[in-house]
Image (cartoon, helix red, strand yellow):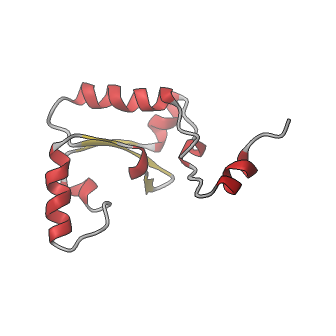
Amino acid sequence: MPFVSSAFLQYLIREARNMGGGVSMVVPRSKGRWEPLCAVYRRKFADAVEKALLAGRNKIDWLFNAAETRVIDQQELDQAGFSTSIFRNMNTPEELEQEQPRA
Protein backbone atom coordinates (compact mmCIF):
# COMPACT_ATOMS: atom_id res chain seq x y z
CA MET A 1 0.00 0.00 0.00
CA PRO A 2 2.42 2.65 -1.20
CA PHE A 3 -0.10 5.49 -1.04
CA VAL A 4 -0.69 5.32 2.72
CA SER A 5 0.75 8.50 4.19
CA SER A 6 2.51 8.95 7.48
CA ALA A 7 -0.30 11.39 8.37
CA PHE A 8 -2.84 8.58 8.06
CA LEU A 9 -0.72 6.17 10.10
CA GLN A 10 -0.36 8.83 12.79
CA TYR A 11 -4.13 9.28 12.72
CA LEU A 12 -4.64 5.53 13.30
CA ILE A 13 -2.14 5.48 16.15
CA ARG A 14 -3.72 8.54 17.75
CA GLU A 15 -7.15 6.89 17.56
CA ALA A 16 -5.77 3.71 19.14
CA ARG A 17 -4.27 5.72 22.01
CA ASN A 18 -7.52 7.63 22.50
CA MET A 19 -9.49 4.39 22.80
CA GLY A 20 -7.37 3.05 25.65
CA GLY A 21 -6.48 -0.55 26.37
CA GLY A 22 -9.93 -2.04 25.84
CA VAL A 23 -9.74 -1.87 22.05
CA SER A 24 -7.84 -4.67 20.31
CA MET A 25 -7.48 -2.90 16.97
CA VAL A 26 -8.26 0.19 14.91
CA VAL A 27 -9.30 -0.79 11.39
CA PRO A 28 -10.41 1.35 8.45
CA ARG A 29 -13.47 0.26 6.49
CA SER A 30 -13.63 1.76 3.02
CA LYS A 31 -16.27 1.19 0.36
CA GLY A 32 -17.76 -1.61 2.45
CA ARG A 33 -14.45 -3.47 2.78
CA TRP A 34 -12.13 -3.92 5.73
CA GLU A 35 -8.56 -2.67 5.23
CA PRO A 36 -6.62 -5.04 7.52
CA LEU A 37 -3.27 -4.27 5.88
CA CYS A 38 -3.61 -0.70 7.08
CA ALA A 39 -4.65 -1.08 10.70
CA VAL A 40 -3.26 -0.82 14.21
CA TYR A 41 -3.33 -3.97 16.33
CA ARG A 42 -2.60 -4.35 20.02
CA ARG A 43 -0.64 -7.33 21.32
CA LYS A 44 -3.72 -8.92 22.87
CA PHE A 45 -5.15 -9.30 19.37
CA ALA A 46 -2.47 -11.93 18.70
CA ASP A 47 -4.21 -14.28 21.17
CA ALA A 48 -7.48 -14.03 19.23
CA VAL A 49 -5.64 -14.63 15.96
CA GLU A 50 -3.86 -17.69 17.33
CA LYS A 51 -7.14 -19.20 18.57
CA ALA A 52 -8.76 -18.54 15.20
CA LEU A 53 -5.92 -20.20 13.31
CA LEU A 54 -6.01 -23.23 15.60
CA ALA A 55 -9.76 -23.48 14.91
CA GLY A 56 -9.10 -23.46 11.15
CA ARG A 57 -10.33 -19.93 10.58
CA ASN A 58 -7.82 -18.37 8.22
CA LYS A 59 -9.66 -15.16 7.27
CA ILE A 60 -9.19 -12.17 9.52
CA ASP A 61 -12.50 -10.44 8.73
CA TRP A 62 -14.61 -12.35 11.26
CA LEU A 63 -12.26 -11.23 14.07
CA PHE A 64 -13.26 -7.61 13.54
CA ASN A 65 -16.69 -8.49 14.90
CA ALA A 66 -15.42 -10.90 17.58
CA ALA A 67 -12.94 -8.52 19.23
CA GLU A 68 -13.23 -4.97 20.55
CA THR A 69 -12.68 -2.99 17.36
CA ARG A 70 -12.54 0.72 16.62
CA VAL A 71 -13.75 1.11 13.04
CA ILE A 72 -12.71 4.10 10.98
CA ASP A 73 -15.62 4.24 8.54
CA GLN A 74 -15.97 5.93 5.17
CA GLN A 75 -17.60 9.05 6.58
CA GLU A 76 -14.83 9.51 9.12
CA LEU A 77 -12.18 9.02 6.44
CA ASP A 78 -13.84 11.71 4.32
CA GLN A 79 -14.19 14.12 7.25
CA ALA A 80 -10.54 13.66 8.19
CA GLY A 81 -9.51 14.41 4.60
CA PHE A 82 -8.22 10.96 3.63
CA SER A 83 -8.99 9.57 0.19
CA THR A 84 -9.90 5.91 -0.21
CA SER A 85 -7.29 5.72 -2.95
CA ILE A 86 -4.63 5.40 -0.24
CA PHE A 87 -5.74 1.78 0.21
CA ARG A 88 -4.85 0.82 -3.37
CA ASN A 89 -2.50 -2.13 -3.16
CA MET A 90 0.33 -2.52 -5.65
CA ASN A 91 1.65 -6.04 -6.12
CA THR A 92 4.39 -5.47 -8.67
CA PRO A 93 6.84 -2.67 -9.55
CA GLU A 94 5.06 -2.40 -12.91
CA GLU A 95 1.71 -1.66 -11.21
CA LEU A 96 3.35 1.02 -9.10
CA GLU A 97 5.01 2.58 -12.14
CA GLN A 98 1.65 2.78 -13.93
CA GLU A 99 0.27 4.78 -11.00
CA GLN A 100 3.14 7.27 -10.87
CA PRO A 101 2.48 10.69 -12.39
CA ARG A 102 4.29 11.31 -15.66
CA ALA A 103 6.80 14.20 -15.75
Q: Residue at x 49, y 28 (%)?
A: 6
Q: Position of residue 3 (x, y in %)?
A: 58, 40
Q: Residue at x 45, y 56 (%)?
A: 33
Q: Is residue 53 above or below residue 93?
A: below
The residue lying toward the viewer, choosing from 36 and 75, is 36
For the C terminus, which image quadrant? top right
Q: Residue at x 55, y 29 (%)?
A: 81
Q: Position of residue 7 (x, y in %)?
A: 49, 26
Rendered image quadrant of residue 54: bottom left
Is residue 28 found left or right of 101 in the rendered image? left
Is residue 81 found left or right of 102 in the rendered image? left
The residue lying toward the viewer, choosing from 102 and 27, is 102
Residue at the extreme bottom of the image, as rendered: 56
Is residue 55 found left or right of 40 in the rendered image? left
Q: Residue at x 41, y 28 (%)?
A: 11
Q: Position of residue 53 (x, y in %)?
A: 20, 67
How many numbered circles are shown?
0
Is residue 5 found left or right of 67 in the rendered image? right
Residue at the extreme right of the image, as rendered: 103
Q: Position of residue 72 (x, y in %)?
A: 39, 40
